[in-house]
Amino acid sequence: MHTATSVSIKKVGNYALGQWIEGAGEGQALFNAVTGEVVAYATTSGLDFKAIMEYGRSVGGPALRKMTFHQRGNMLKALALHLRKHLDKFYRVSYLTGATKADSWVDIEGGIGNLFSNASLRRKFPDDVICIDGESHNLSKNNTFMGTHILVPKEGVAVHINAFNFPVWGMLEKIAVNLLAGVPCIVKPATATSYLTEVVVREIIASKILPEGALQLICGSAGDILNHVMCQDVVTFTGSASTGLMLKSNPYILRESVPFNMEADSLNCIVLGSDVNPGMPEWDIFVKEVRKEMTLKAGQRCTGVRRIFVPESKMEDMIRSLSEALAQTVIGNPLNEKVRMGSLAGQTQRKEVLDQVQKLLATSQIVYGSLDSVEVADADAKVGAFLSPILLKNENPFGCKEPHEIEAFGPVSTIMPYKTPEEAIALSKLGKGSLVTTIVTADYKEARNYVIGAASYHGRVLVLNNECAKENTGHGSPLPMLVHGGPGRAGGGEEMGGVRGVKHYLQRTALQGSPTMITEIVQVYQPHAKGKDPGKHPFKKYFEELQIGDQLITDKRVITADDIDKFADLTGDHFYAHLKDTNFEGTMFERQVAHGYLMMSIAAGLFVDCYEKNPVLLNYGIDELRFTKPTYPGSEVYVRFTCKEKLPSDKRVVEKPEDFRRGDDIDKGIVKWLVEILDEKNEIVATGTILTMVQRKHG
């Protein structure tokens, strides 16, 4: 018999105003979901929410805004590395929530993975406190007036109101984004599992990696915190659609136009393609996916599969396959290594699931599982919050609303038939907006039609077949680089999404002025800005010595037909436009024209003027290369070569000597150069951005 890990009964702490605070009174009892024992009490009684909000704005905000995007990204990386050292502690507490090791891995290490992923996003931003967003625009005939968009951190606080099912991931996936953006946060986890969130936050605070005021934690009631929001704040919510609507309607949120991002539980669905039959790999993939979605975290996932759509003629075969798969799932004490499904998060959640199932039974019937009994390993089914997986069947999905409106937030799904692929699309939309939908099919055309037809009602679409079966991340796994959210019932919001998610916490502002002025403000060279005399060849400067706008005007060179012929012979590029004897009638060219890549090669010959070793270590690549005007033999060209942007590079961490690569010990950065090739009329014939790796003088 495995006994669930126990902890001494304590009061869960709140971290606010720079200190750990216990709320007044006993508070709400929090339970071990496996044994039913009280493990902690939580309360926010007596906390001054107005002061907590102001503390974040006045202490955490300024400290974060002084840091660059790269500094904040490295801060997230350091935090992730620190938390990884305490995994055993987090897992021990996670078992109390009824989570198996696999469930806990998703919650704990998945959350830490979000920190790592967002840390890597720093490379998408400048090493600055300000960022350009999108293209710049010339607004004048003589190139003296332009406009662009900039992003700066909001000067408020992010208030995160999270759900009970992922007490670690739910926090870390949100704070990773606001911290990278430079905005402090207040985390309000669901009270039922807040004792796990608190354990993680204690390690974060103890590490002293975050500046003071960047993260505050309240465990218990949110009190009147939303009555103190201001226009610079951001509120996020994860939970039920009804609670989200109530919070979103707060008069202070409406009056101050506070951004409110909601990720609500939804009636997500999975579709078996009409082409899939028993015996095909896709059939087994479908069964495995549904089983995983019903049993992982005991079905307590906002992305869980609630509706299963199968071709009408294959319903009975699929019910048999799913029942056999579900019957193999060992339920019980998550500390037992054989257990694959733990308990729900508590008796309150269990009762809510059973109440919702009763509503679904008005139009559906149970084809697998039981509401009254469940066989468990190493646990007491009566005192633990255990529930059998419940597979319901509804034979009239277009004729009843319950399966498309009622969600049982546990190991419960309803299987329903469809006649045509068009019906499957229509059924998917009856959920009125979902976080995710999956189609399992080997038919590319059916997959395309489903995606086009269903995407507008879903935040994410997963297409599964045998090609990606081994490496796909699954129906229920939101990813840091992709948006997580959905329209309608799902809340209409977006979380994560890589750079997109960070921008939710940044103010986008249109900026207008002269090219030189805007260059100095944003520290990215803008076309037509004044260049700076570098004093010496830019390639002889170390990374720290280079200034944005350092500009070199090269000597001139005449392009000859012989140049073009030799380049064609050397590369094998004998495109007709590069040949002298081509009849150019009906083409876009007057006569033999130089290769675009020849022009870039000649440009390199003009601006590279260093025969000895210098701080430039290597050419890293070319971005935004454009050929804007044909160059004919006899044209005289030169290059305007300008330092456009500087990005730091972190030294690669080498854990094993055999992984060391030449250059790993060199402190360096990436420099972007604007290359403009001009002809004798001073008109640009080609332009591009060349990236070089440049050594630092002082490592």
Image (cartoon, rainbow, N blue to C red):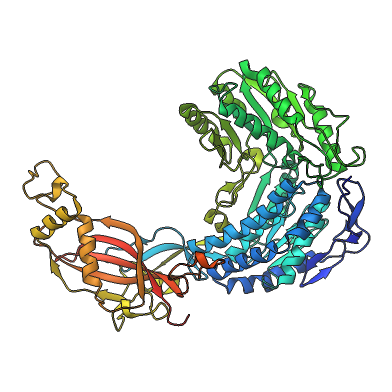
**Location of residue 68 by image quarter:** bottom right
Quadrant in the picture for residue 564: bottom left
- State whether residue 86 appears in this view: yes
Q: Quadrant of the N terminus?
A: top right
Give me the residue at 21% from left, 73% from top. Answer: 554
Q: What is the residue that sits farthest to the top in this orientation? A: 313
Position of 532 compared to 486: left or right? left
Camera-side residue of 156 and 198:
198
Above or below 258: residue 524? below
What is the x, y in percent for residue 222?
79, 56
In terms of image quadrants, where is residue 344?
top right
**Front-most of 126 and 287?**
287
Please provide percent x and percent y for residue 70. Answer: 53, 68
Reply above or below: 535 against 20. below
Residue, far bottom:
535
The x, y position of residue 681, in whole percent, is 15, 65
Name the residue located 81 percent from the left edge and 64 percent from the top edge. Answer: 14
Tally of marks: 0
| Position of residue 6 in the picture relative to residue 610 (left or right) | right
Of all residues, the one furthest to the front in this rendering is: 658
Q: Is any part of residue 223 visible from this angle? A: no
Q: Residue at x 81, y 47 (%)?
A: 335
**Residue 404 falls left or right of residue 511:** right
Q: Is residue 201 above or below residue 244?
A: below
Percent coordinates x, y for residue 211 in the rendering: 67, 73
